[in-house]
Image (cartoon, grey):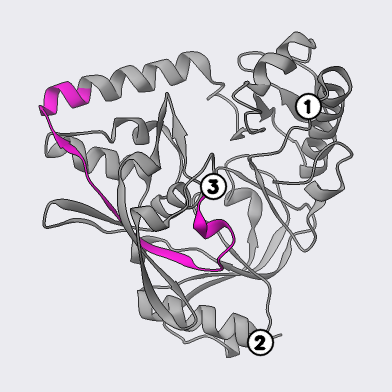
Amino acid sequence: MFYEDLFDDEVEMIFDADLNTLTTVKTGGKAKVVVSPNSSEQLIKIIRIVKQNKIPFFILGNGSNVLASDKGFNGVIIKPGRFLSQIFFEKDLIAAEAGATTAMLANFAMQYGLTGAEFLSTIPATVGGAVAMNAGCFGYTVKDKVQKVIAADENGEHVFYANQLMFGYRTSIFENNGMVIIRAYFKFEQSDKEKVEEVMAKLKSLKRNLQPLDFPSFGSVFKRHEGISPAIMIDKLGFKGLTVGGAKVSEKHAGFFVNTGKATTEDFLTLINIVGSKVYEVYGVKLKTEVKYLGDTDDLGRLSYSYGV
């Protein structure tokens, strides 16, 4: 399949892209092609092309919760980037395009003395990714602030209002409806810029103290189980510091597995399986992963204790 013949010349394309540069955990092989649409119209056209040609595709944001196959990905990675990363006011709402980062959104709100976005400054995600998975931390989640979302499929743009988004724990309607987020609209409350800055600084400091930010990772490995933090169970099992190849259970936070330098995705899969299997053996809990797998096959699905995401 010659992808350069399928897409317009205006589409930004990178062939044989290194997935270890596109994911925060820094593992993975080569991606056949990464395309970055420069408008919503172009995005819709790309979706139409890949679906009509039955080409596997993956929507990639900042890559902060993605584990990419060591063998790479032979489909098309669609990455809304610099061309779809604007943030602006639309009446009393802040509109943020999918490629903008959550840190950009938090800083934009802060500049106008708006509160409610501070937690977003600590999440290493794009707006599109954060909305799709209902990202959150420190007791806050995206769903608390989103008013509506514009998304697209091969037929064009669609509007989803807050009550249609089916937000849940690390999930939303966009997990399975085949649509790609273009823009999200947020409602924040008026406050004082200095106070907002102070809250942001405190949350960032708290994150530095609690999480292993000195090493590449894909964030929290497992979803909470019935409100219980997996990190507590992993810590009690004595797994902090457990290492497989270059992948290690963080000594700072057992819910994070880090790349100590030369980890492969296979190292992480093995470590996830060891830890998850022991948690199931001891506690009878089948942990499910927060991380998404990017590859030609879903290697997370082969783990003995879990069923992927």
Q: Real-space Cα distance between discs 2 and 1?
A: 41 Å
Q: How many marks?
A: 3
Q: What secondary structure is marked by label 2?
A: loop
Q: Position of residue 293 (x, y in %)?
A: 70, 51
Type of amino acid at the residue the image marks with label 1: Val
For residue 151, side relative to residue 175 (left or right): left
Viewer-proximal residue among 287 and 199: 287
Q: What residue does disc 1 label? A: 285
Structural crowding at the residue carrying mark 2, measured as other residues with C-alpha within 10 Å and reported as few (<14), some (14–19) or many (≥20) = few
- Does residue 84 lie above or below 145 as drawn? below
Type of amino acid at the residue the image marks with label 2: Asn
Viewer-proximal residue among 188 and 247: 188
Residue 271 location, quadrant? top right
Q: Real-space Cα distance between discs 2 and 3?
A: 28 Å
* Residue 240 in sight here: yes
Sequence-wise, the earlier of marks 2 and 3 is: 2
Q: Position of residue 93 (x, y in %)?
A: 18, 52
At horizontal 69% and vertical 39% (from top left) the residue drawn is: 289
**Residue 171, label in figure:** 3
At horizontal 68% and vertical 72% (from top left) the residue drawn is: 56
Sequence-wise, the earlier of marks 3 and 1 is: 3
Closer to the eye: label 2 or 1 = 1
Sequence-wise, the earlier of marks 2 and 1 is: 2
Residue 216 shown in magenta: no
Q: What secondary structure is marked by label 1?
A: loop
Type of amino acid at the residue the image marks with label 3: Thr
Q: What residue does disc 2 label? A: 53
Q: Position of residue 160 (x, y in %)?
A: 37, 63
- Does residue 291 lie above or below 85 as drawn? above
| Quadrant of image for the N terminus | bottom right
* Residues drawn in magenta: 171-197
